Amino acid sequence: MRVRRGAAEPGWLRGAPPPRWARVAPAVALVVLSSAQLLTPATVELGFFLAAVPPVAAFSYGALGTAVFAAVVLVLLGVPHLSVAHARGTDLATVAAVGLLSVVLSWVRRRRDAQLVSVRTVAEAAQLAVLPPLPERVGPVRCSGLYRAAQLGTLVGGDLYDVRAGPFGVRALVGDVQGHGLAAVATVAALLGAFREAVLDDAELTAVAARLDRRLVADAAGEEHAEIFATAVLLEFPPGRALVRVLSCGHPPAVLLRGRSVREVAADPGMPLGLGMADVLPAVVTTLPLAAGDRLLLHTDGITEARDTSGAFYPLVARLPVLAGAGADGAALTAAVWKDLTRFTAGLTDDVALLVLSLDVPEAADVPEAADVTEASDVPDASDGPRPPPGRPAF
């Protein structure tokens, strides 16, 4: 299951339908002003305030609806009990001109809103083509992801993830490219394209990492992009085996959740992608046996480097035992982490990606010894003071 954001829903003034109160406001204003004029002495003139009703209606109604309000205002100004003592033909002409201008403005607004919706639809389709929604299952692996782009109005930023099945098993990628927002989308697209090809062609995870590294090196050869870096973690679930292989390229470590136990996978952090070192100094692949019910949580530094008002980093691993609960599925876990993160921080400024994977393992399988992990209790707590997570260079 995929939870998407990037873009919050468009606001009323950015193409979305107006809220109910905005559509009710002009009618309420008509009733209130008319009633007030009837209840006040004749010397008190409120009629001209009705001239403000058509411009207000133009924000939430089309040209026809705005014209109706303008006509009603002119009729009300002609009612003896509501007429303005000093109203003359020129005054009524002025009110009529305001109404006509309001009709034109409402027509222009409707056209602009339609254009915004069209552009937004095309942009969302293009971004979803780069980072399509994850399926709930890829082969024997169940998937649940959460993605939040930092830049308002976008669905894709500088983080990425994908899960693909191939001849060598199910492989997953979580990465974080240099920068965030729309400026990083081209790099995200290049990495995802290289990964999807590698899933089909490369038998070893080290070869997959080398392909991704070469892709960034080639892209950085252009004059416009002198340096392009990315961190990533690659996972491989071999066919018919209850284990996972992990390869890290300078990325925050994966987290293993086994019941209420939470452990960081102690994989060699490796070198970030884009340095041209993947072939020379290949990262070490860590093999981790899996038991029934095990879940693997992968994330980007947008989570672990988020700060509260005091400057402390978000302690993801320390909070996971409570957030995970007993038997909580991946969708519930991602939702719980996101809710807790937004409560903790003073405001997110970086892209956020979170991926939870679980392999279908027979219940009768023995619980293996997970030697390549670090206990959650060994992870520094955020109360020790602000410190960046290990294995992640600062971009």
Image (cartoon, rainbow, N blue to C red):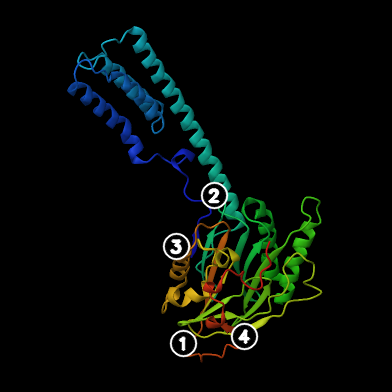
Give the image quarter of residue 275: bottom right
Q: What numbered label is drawn on residue 372?
A: 4
Give the mark, 2 or 1, whose residue is nearer the N terminus.
2
As measured in the structure, the alpha-carbon distance from the residue carrying label 4 to the one carrying label 2 is 39 Å
**Tag 3: amino acid:** Arg
**Residue 343 marker:** 3
* Position of residue 255 measured from the top left corner of the image (x, y, whole percent): 56, 77
Q: Which residue is mark 1?
A: 363
- Alpha carbons under labels 2 and 3: distance apart: 19 Å
Residue shown at 45%/66% (left/top)? 340
- Label 3: how many Cα within 10 Å (few below 14, some 14–19, many 20+): few
- Residue 52 falls in image quadrant: top left
Instruction: Look at discs 2 and 3 and give the one toward the viewer.
Output: 3
Residue beneath the point at 72% across and 71% down = 209
Give the mark toward the camera: 1 or 3.
3
Counting from the top left corner in percent of width and height, residue 169 is at 62, 76
Dot placed on the residue nearer the N-terminal end, 3 or 4: 3
Q: Amino acid at mark 4?
A: Asp
Q: Residue at x 17, y 23 (%)?
A: 39
Locate the C terminus and report the quarter of the image it occupies.
bottom right
Q: Give the mark nearer the N terminus: 1 vs 3.
A: 3
Task: Residue under label 2, please give it.
Answer: 152
Find residue 312 and report its horizontal and vertical position in percent: 54, 67
